[in-house]
Amino acid sequence: MRMKTTTLGHALILTAAVALMAAPPASAQGSTEDLAKQLANPIASLISVPLQLNWDQDIGPVDDGEKLLLNIQPVIPITLNSKWNVISRTIVPLVHQDEIFPGAGSQTGFSDVVQSVFFSPKDPTDSGWIWGAGPVFLFPTGTDELLTTDQWGIGPTGVALKQDGPWTYGALANQMWSIAGSDDRPNLNATFFQPFLSYTTPTAWTYTIQSETTYDWEDAGLAVPVNLLATKVVKLGNQLASVGGGVRYWVDSTANGPEGFAFRVMFTLLYPK
């Protein structure tokens, strides 16, 4: 199995490895467990800056391509009033890819930004469910023609989850359509569905299984990756953070999409109120 890693990738992996060895003091265990459970909730009232490094392989018609994708994903909750929050979730993708089709060469730069806005009640429902809904936007910010859809997109997004003791389970979904963009590029009409199940221990470890399934209605393309992940909340000096990673397997993929096993490394800065 081949793997090419940029200097940025080495730095993130090293940082995560060092942080994993930095266990928090016993007096901080309770607070870190609570933070770990908040992180398992995509619309928790917690400011965080996740850095998510993904590596995929066997891309393209001859399975010769590979990709490093660093998602910078700031999450910012805003209080509307005594009953409602607004949660801003932004994904800024930084990509390095190589030979995604024969003769494509390498590209490095930003891909398209996804911005989600969730309106969410501060209190769970009587049965304990937490939910949020709102719009999602796609901005064609890619710095190379092979890193962008060249389409402006919009649609609805929503999430529903329940936290029961150490368990968190639920799903996040969105649907996006093109509203403007290049006539030379395919229109956007895609559904994203992310079911998740997490277990958080008293020592602030969280073990998660989830999928990030996408269905492209334009070409009937289905991509189904399954991720197995482990993360831990730690203290790095005075800074709270979550570190971890895991493995991904592509159960199904589009004709030119990645295949087989892949990897993910995560490092998240936390700013609790």
Image: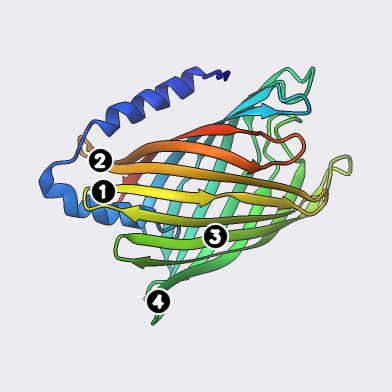
Mark 4 or 1, closer to the camera: 1
Q: Which residue is mark 1?
A: 204
Q: Which residue is mark 3?
A: 172
Query: Mark 3 or 1 closer to N-term?
Result: 3
Query: Mark 1 or 2 closer to N-term?
Result: 1
Q: How many angstroms separate mark 2 from mark 3 (CA)?
A: 26 Å
Q: Which residue is mark 2?
A: 234
Q: How many angstroms separate mark 3 from mark 1 (CA)?
A: 23 Å
- Mark 4 surroundings within 10 Å by alpha-carbon count, few (fewer than 14), some (14 through 19), many (20 or more): few
Q: Which element carries disc 2, helix, strand or loop?
A: strand
Amino acid type at image mark 1: Ala
Disc count in the image? 4
Amino acid type at image mark 2: Val
Q: Which element carries disc 4, helix, strand or loop?
A: loop
- Contact, mark 4 vs mark 1 (Cβ under 8 Å): no
Q: How many angstroms separate mark 2 from mark 4 (CA)?
A: 31 Å
User: Which residue is the extreme one toward the right?
Assistant: 183
Which one is in front, 264 or 74?
264
